[in-house]
Image (cartoon, rainbow, N blue to C red):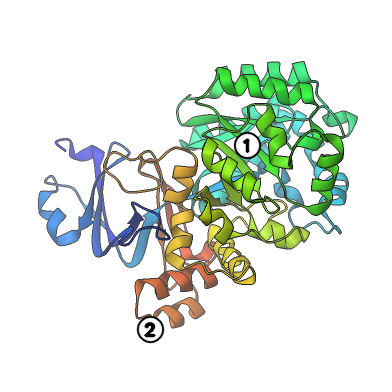
Amino acid sequence: MSNTTNVQAYRASLLHFHADPAFAQDAHRWHEDGLLVIEDGRVRACGDYAQLVTGLPHGVEVQDYRGKLIVPGFIDTHVHYPQTDMIASPAPGLLPWLETYTFPTERRFGDPEHAGQVAEFFLDELLRCGTTTAMVYCTVHPESVDAFFGAAEKRNLRMAAGKVLMDRHCPDFLCDTAEGGARDTEALIRKWHDRGRAMYAITPRFAPTSTEAQLGLAGELARAYPETFIQTHVSENGDECSWVKSLYPQARSYLDVYDRYGLMRPRAMYGHCIWLDDDDFARMAATGAAAAVCPTSNFFLGSGLFDFAKADQHRIALSLATDVGGGTAFSMLQTMNEAYKVARLKGSYLPALRMFYLATLGAARSMRLEGTIGSFAAGAEADFIVLDPRATPLLARRTGHCDSLEELLFALALLGDDRAVAATYAAGKLVHERSPTH
């Protein structure tokens, strides 16, 4: 750390994880008076202030966030940026919601200017809520992907995204072809994957809107480009599951449809997973595929309740996701709030430590990015946020008499939202700072 211009230091309470609290004792690291040292956009040290401050290079000023909590940036593993403008749209269920709002909204994303405007707003909203990485659905238009990655590149954000593949059961204005969708996807992979901090996700929307030919070509791309991601939906809604069964009668289950076409592997992220059975969960564990749990969306659309206990029995990789625009908030704190209620309604319990793990290291592990994001391990990219336990009068009153770290985190998860995020940093650079007047 010889060049002081490349070194920054931040003093606050520090929290990060090295294991899943559900399966390991002492899974977290907590430094009540901590120091986070960043060099060239990466973590160089994280520990007690008293132990680290004397080792700082001469001339490095310490940013003082005492009274606040620094954690790794949140990771949202399932979200639709084109649906930003249709969040909070009423409908009696998933399928009519898609037809009435989603498809007409996505139609406009062939226009690069419109796509760019929405991408800019979307990313600003993520950063305002403390989310520094997301797995993002674009639309069928390649222009929507270029607009998204272009906006993320300007902010130097680590983001995964992909063009949606749909070649049936959708409006003509959103329908691609199996061959055309695969061709566009491969071109976008070559253009964007591993360019800076961009990561490409092969993105069949869901089994009902793809033919067997399209899913087959998606599987071929997944094998040809094993470092890319895969993202899609599975077992979200009862009507949807029945529809899939009628379209793919040869498949054992909804999840088995994807498995048959080579879409179950590490770096495959499956949104929802509400109606999976034990064989499905076992298959996810065996293949390294992960689940993105979307509680606000599942409540909003009446889809069902995710079974955390069953998923944990099979030790599948779990993460939390907002699923905007079916989801009703960009905030991962608000998503934790609803996830806690889902667990209670299914007869299980999510401690606050587990929820913060799922939104940070758990998500990074689900994406096979441990050591890159999601923790303060030495060498990790310096994506982090500053949480203010006194951001609102109610938060300040409740956190003013917390007796444990668990109580403090629980109050942030149940009472917090974007107002609790005082600052957001990406690769060591400040990308959002909350105005004291807001």
Residue 129 at what x, y percent from top left? 53, 56
The kind of secondary structure element at disc 1 is strand
**Callout 2: few (<14), some (14-19), or many (20+) C-alpha neighbours within 10 Å?**
few
Is 71 drawn above or below residue 417 in the view shown? above
Q: Is residue 361 visible?
A: yes
Residue 126 at what x, y percent from top left? 56, 50
Chain-order first, disc 1 or disc 2 = 1
The image quadrant that residue 143 belongs to is top right
The image quadrant that residue 365 belongs to is top left
Is 172 drawn above or below residue 313 in the view shown? above
Mark 1 against mark 2, which lies toward the viewer?
A: 1
Pick the residue in front: 420 or 286: 286
The residue pinned by badge 1 equals 231
Residue type at the position of mark 1:
Gln
Q: Quadrant of the N terminus?
A: top left
Q: Is residue 435 visible?
A: no
Q: Is residue 31 left or right of residue 338?
A: left
- The answer for how far apart the CA atoms under marks 1 and 2 are is 42 Å
Residue 346 at what x, y percent from top left? 63, 68
Residue at the spot 52% in from the left edge and 65% down from the top edge: 419
Is 369 drawn above or below residue 178 in the view shown? below
The image quadrant that residue 176 belongs to is top right
Residue at the spot 83% in from the left edge and 36% down from the top edge: 249
**Callout 1: few (<14), some (14-19), or many (20+) C-alpha neighbours within 10 Å?**
many
Is 151 drawn above or below residue 304 in the view shown? above
Any mark on residue 401, and which? 2
Residue 70 at what x, y percent from top left? 36, 58
Residue type at the position of mark 2:
His
Q: Is residue 434 left or right of residue 378?
A: right
The kind of secondary structure element at disc 2 is loop
